[in-house]
Image: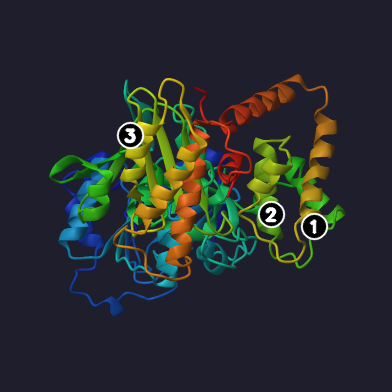
Amino acid sequence: MFRRGSDRAGAVHGPAHTVLAAVLPPAAVPVGVVPVTAGGTTSAMFRPRTVGEAVEMLAAAHDSGAAVALLGGGTDLVPALRSGERAAEVVVALRRVLELRVRGAGADSLTIGAGVTYTDLAGWSLSPGLARAARVVGSVQIRNTGTVGGALGSARPAGDLLTFLTAADAEVLTTSPRGSDRLPLPRFLAEGLAPDALVTAVRLARPGGPQVYLKIGERQAAYPAVVSCAVLVDRVRHRLTCAVGGVGLLPARMEAAERYARDEVDWSTGTVSSAAARRFGDLVVEAATRITPALPAGPRGSAEYRWHAAGVLAGRAFARCLHVTAPPASGPVGDFAAGGQP
Amino acid sequence: MTAVPADGLDAGAEGADRAGGAAGADGGESYRLNVDGFLRTVNGASIGDSLLTVLRDTLGVTAVKDACEQGRCGACSVLLDGRLAASCTVLAADADGTRVVTVAGLGGAGLARAVRAMFLAEGAVQCGFCTPGFVVAVTDLLTRHPDADEEEIREALAGNICRCTGYGRILAAVRAVQAERGALRSGDAHSSGETQRHGETQRHSDGGPDGW
């Protein structure tokens, strides 16, 4: 049944649960009763207009015991529903929640709504590093549709945005019936989203220096990266952060390499020796081998390949962020400095 | 299936507004989609069906092609509220209230006509399965960036896969459209100004890291 008029705020407040009761098959209804077609077992969709409505609908659906999925752009969820990889009895579609599409800048921070697409990010001059990372996600079709909230909700191991946001010490803003919350990204990724909560935004510091994101993989437009790496420099705090995706189940920070960079970089000029760039890559390889839990071996290439790729990408990103003094003749660091898309 | 002309964009949006809220799959109720300027009533589709599935199997709109269903091949490309999207990654019920434009709705004149004509003239069509998606993607590209360079064209079409042509003829068709349209536009100060601004943006944002 398709609800008419429930998009009126008055109709949804309070009656939201009634609406759900009418729409949701009681959890006791066996899945088999729902017509199983190409659309799988999904039997209800809610299309809230505000975060408040979304949270009410989410909570009510969750209380009813139904399997609920949040729908952002759909680039991950819809194919997964089709293939049966994921099943959802209830879909809460967030397309019409305009407040999730807002992005803004404070004095020190950038806040990006969960409904902001990669295409929106790709043109954002306030965060050129993030814009470049967004520009190399998938195809035009994917970038026009996929959202920041979806990247967090899907948490792909080498997800372009996740690797960048991990290096950026991002925080995830959520809303649930218990109110709003703010979690560091690693904690959010480790704990997962509460079933009645919604990611509303992600917050990160304004860029404080060069930021480079690199990845390696199959055809970019069609497949997620195999290995990805982000290096972010903060010239004011004399700090460099580095995250690697695609080696572990989640992106990992390369803390030993970060400490090395802090001591090795001449922060007044942003200069570093070519030997240091090489050493930075080596430290990332060492750390990559110790990332747990590691991705199971599979079509993403062997662990050894991914460790090696992490080191190459990190060294290359590091060299692009800084001024590298000329390498000794025919030194291998020239390879890093040459850059170019992997 | 019923099809009534959507009285311009407003009618489509309003109709969808009234129909919005939530949907169930008991088959008794329906929602509406604005497809190529017509409001189409969807009956009997599952709520979990993609826009691609509903367009082809429920509404009989075969201008979108069904290949990978993973958002990778671009054969099902449409414009969703003016933005290029793979219709297999959109739930149809969630497209209620948006404007869906397939290759059949791009229009018989102007840029879309030129794209179709040049695909034929340049031999950019072999088996033709990818062609509707390509025509939508090329029209979208040249609407946004009439003077896109080779790299921008290749990047913009990376989401559309062709297994016949090797892409060479398709790229030639895009350049032919640009040449034809460029000749039409020559002397149009507004267009060239826009193009220049775009070029500057690209140079700025694709440049190296911020200098020290």
In the rendered view, would you say A237 is above or below B15? above
- Residue B193 visible here: yes
Tag 1 near tag 2, CB within 8 Å: yes
Q: Quadrant of residue A130?
A: top left
Q: Position of residue B132 (x, y in %)?
A: 68, 58
Asked if both marks, 1 and 3, belong to the same chain, the answer given is: no
Chain of the residue under label 3: A
Q: CA distance from mark 1 to mark 2?
A: 10 Å
The circle on residue B134 is: 2
Locate residue B21 relative to residue B145 in the image: left or right.
Answer: left
Q: CA distance from mark 2 to mark 3?
A: 37 Å
Give the structural element (helix, strand or loop) at label 2: helix
In the rendered view, would you say A86 is above or below B106? below
Tag 3 residue: A204
Look at label 1 and name its amino acid: Ala
Chain of the residue under label 1: B
Q: Position of residue A22 (x, y in %)?
A: 22, 61
Q: CA distance from mark 1 to mark 3?
A: 45 Å
Q: Nearer the viewer, residue A64 or B96?
A: A64
Nearer to us of marks 2 and 3 is 3
Chain of the residue under label 2: B
- Residue B38 visible here: no
In the rendered view, would you say B125 is above or below A117? below
Most extreme residue toward the bottom, as rendered? A32
Locate residue A171 relative to residue B75 in the image: left or right.
Answer: left
**Neighbour tally class for label 1: few under 14, some 14-19, many 20 plus, Cα within 10 Å:** many
- Is the N terminus of chain B in the top left, top right, bottom left or bottom right quadrant? bottom right
Tag 2 near tag 3, CB within 8 Å: no
For image coordinates 55% across by 62% down, the residue present is: B55
For image coordinates 73% across by 38% down, the residue present is: B149
**Neighbour tally class for label 2: few under 14, some 14-19, many 20 plus, Cα within 10 Å:** many
Tag 1 residue: B124
